[in-house]
């Protein structure tokens, strides 16, 4: 549309500007509602996220090319894990990009509010992020700016990837991009080395940084000085704080993402087969109450990862969580000496303890003749005679593909807020503050659809 051409047919659409949603380097984003013309019931009720880009910020050729590329790439992507591009238009002052709104803000807001997330929540979000990247990469697009602030949460706590301002189209196999771009804490080493170029693997790196940040509350390479951050990234210098309890599967997942050589980095298919995502079912939905507090223990218990992973047991010591020293000693002996295990378990059975462990070992022999790693449950039950009964869990490999299931218990039982989202809005949402007279909340835009 050419705003200066008087011969063009124009349609005037009025929007009511509501909440301020956020801002970036070149744009601000508002929640808007259509005022007129009202053509359907959806027009009356639906709200959108309207990204407003002032034309004053588009005087440079690179800035115009960047916006054009963002619009072209984003409008070509239609997937359940990607923020939906509705349309775009312009007037004399601004370019407007209309997107589906994600009512529960971003993962950055969630982590800032909660400090850090539980592993069950992290698995839920990382699975959706990996599926989003699968689709985006199939479309020959590299996002290049994956971070918590660009991962948005829907009304039902689903994850959607947005902000394709730095995304790049790959035009031929093996093509390498050489533009140094992204957010410092999330940059991959090859991005900092502009001579070598980068490709899809930068998104794999960012997934590892995102998982670390969700679990520990801060990025792995964060420092006060950006140059120091870059130095840590290039040398892949990071650690796992001991005061935060994170399982071996999550740590191994992160380590396999944060590898300096992009060719050695874990790819998306391998992520879906990793124990962190594949070992136990992933929630199909997560309670809305997690916006302000951790999930209930009953919910976590359904989807928690075991303390021992079959694929990690060969090279990682298997921690045993018995309630007593006797339980720990017996479990260690049962792992170290297979022949002695049977006699020991039988003796304990005669004494009335570890009945489940003995039965499980009898029934589950690995093909090599060795017994699978044994882990006693954290929750032990007390028998009538005062002896402890510990149920056994073996490490027999299961299907590599993640299992997505509905919670066994209705989600409303875990989530007192899910039935009334307004309660959350009252607690954490900032009410809209009018800016000047009411007439300033109206945006009259001359529109010609492209």
Image: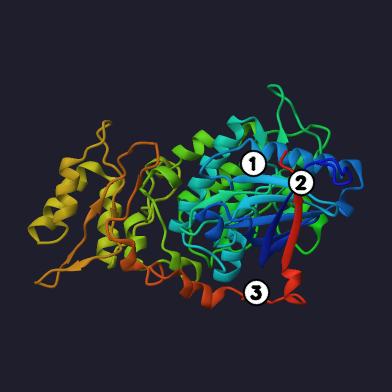
Q: In this view, does 71 lie to the left or right of 424?
A: right
Q: In this view, does 363 lie above or below 289?
A: above
Q: Position of residue 40 (x, y in %)?
A: 53, 52
Mark toward the viewer: 2 or 1: 2
- Place of residue 205 in the rendered image (x, y in percent of width and height, measured from the top left): 64, 43
Q: Does the image show residue 180?
A: no
How would you rate the neighbour count of disc 1 (Cα within 10 Å): few for under 14, some for 14-19, many for 20 or more?
many
Q: Which of 59 and 355 is in front in this view?
A: 59
Quarter of the figure that contains the C terminus: top right
Position of residue 101 relative to residue 312, above or below, is: below
Q: Is residue 54 left or right of residue 60?
A: left
* Residue contact at pointers 2 and 3, CB within 8 angstroms: no
According to the image, label 3 marks what residue? Answer: 432
Sequence order check, earlier mark of 2 and 3: 2
Question: Residue at position x 82%, y 37% from top?
Answer: 194
Q: Which mark is residue 114?
A: none
Please name the residue shown 9% across and 72% down the image. 385
Mark 3 or 1, closer to the camera: 3
Residue 8: x, y in percent?
A: 81, 41
Viewer-side residue, 31 vs 447: 447
Instruction: Residue 200: name its quadrant.
Output: top right
Mark 2 sits on what residue?
10
Marks 2 & 1, CB-CB < 8 Å contact:
no
Q: SS at mark 1?
A: helix
Q: Distance between the residues labelled 2 and 3?
A: 31 Å
């Amino acid at each position: 549309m050419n705003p200066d051409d008087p011969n063009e047919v124009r349609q005037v659409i009025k929007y009511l500007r509501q909440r301020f949603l956020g801002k970036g380097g070149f744009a601000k984003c508002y929640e808007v509602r259509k005022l007129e013309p009202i053509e359907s019931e959806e027009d009356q009720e639906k709200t959108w996220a309207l990204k407003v880009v002032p034309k004053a910020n588009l005087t440079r050729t690179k800035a115009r090319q960047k916006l054009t590329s963002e619009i072209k790439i984003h409008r070509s992507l239609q997937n359940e894990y990607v923020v939906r591009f509705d349309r775009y238009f312009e007037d004399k002052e601004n370019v407007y990009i209309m997107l589906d709104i994600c009512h529960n803000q971003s993962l950055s807001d969630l982590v800032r509010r909660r400090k850090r997330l539980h592993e069950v929540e992290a698995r839920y979000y990382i699975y959706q992020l990996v599926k989003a990247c699968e689709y985006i990469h199939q479309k020959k697009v590299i996002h290049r700016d994956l971070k918590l602030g660009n991962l948005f949460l829907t009304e039902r706590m689903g994850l959607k990837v947005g902000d394709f301002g730095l995304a790049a189209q790959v035009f031929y196999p093996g093509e390498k991009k050489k533009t140094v771009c992204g957010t410092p804490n999330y940059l991959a080493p090859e991005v900092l080395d502009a001579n070598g170029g980068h490709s899809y693997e930068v998104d794999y790196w960012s997934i590892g940084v995102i998982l670390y940040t969700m679990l520990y509350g801060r990025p792995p390479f964060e420092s006060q000085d950006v140059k120091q951050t870059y130095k840590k990234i290039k040398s892949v210098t990071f650690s796992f704080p001991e005061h935060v309890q994170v399982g071996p599967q999550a740590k191994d997942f992160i380590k396999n993402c944060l590898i300096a050589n992009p060719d050695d980095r874990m790819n998306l298919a391998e992520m879906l087969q990793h124990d962190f995502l594949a070992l136990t079912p992933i929630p199909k939905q997560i309670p809305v109450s997690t916006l302000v507090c951790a999930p209930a223990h009953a919910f976590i218990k359904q989807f928690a990862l075991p303390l021992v992973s079959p694929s990690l047991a060969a090279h990682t010591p298997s921690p045993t969580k018995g309630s007593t020293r006797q339980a720990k000693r017996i479990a260690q002996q049962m792992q170290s000496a297979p022949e002695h295990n049977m006699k020991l378990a039988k003796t304990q059975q005669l004494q009335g303890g570890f009945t489940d462990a003995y039965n499980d070992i009898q029934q589950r022999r690995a093909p090599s003749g060795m017994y699978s790693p044994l882990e006693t449950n954290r929750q032990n039950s007390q028998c009538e005679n005062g002896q402890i009964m510990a149920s056994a869990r073996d490490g027999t490999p299961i299907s590599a593909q993640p299992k997505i299931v509905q919670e066994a218990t209705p989600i409303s039982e875990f989530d007192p807020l899910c039935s009334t989202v307004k309660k959350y809005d009252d607690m954490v949402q900032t009410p809209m503050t009018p800016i000047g007279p009411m007439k300033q909340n109206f945006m009259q835009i001359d529109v010609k659809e492209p």
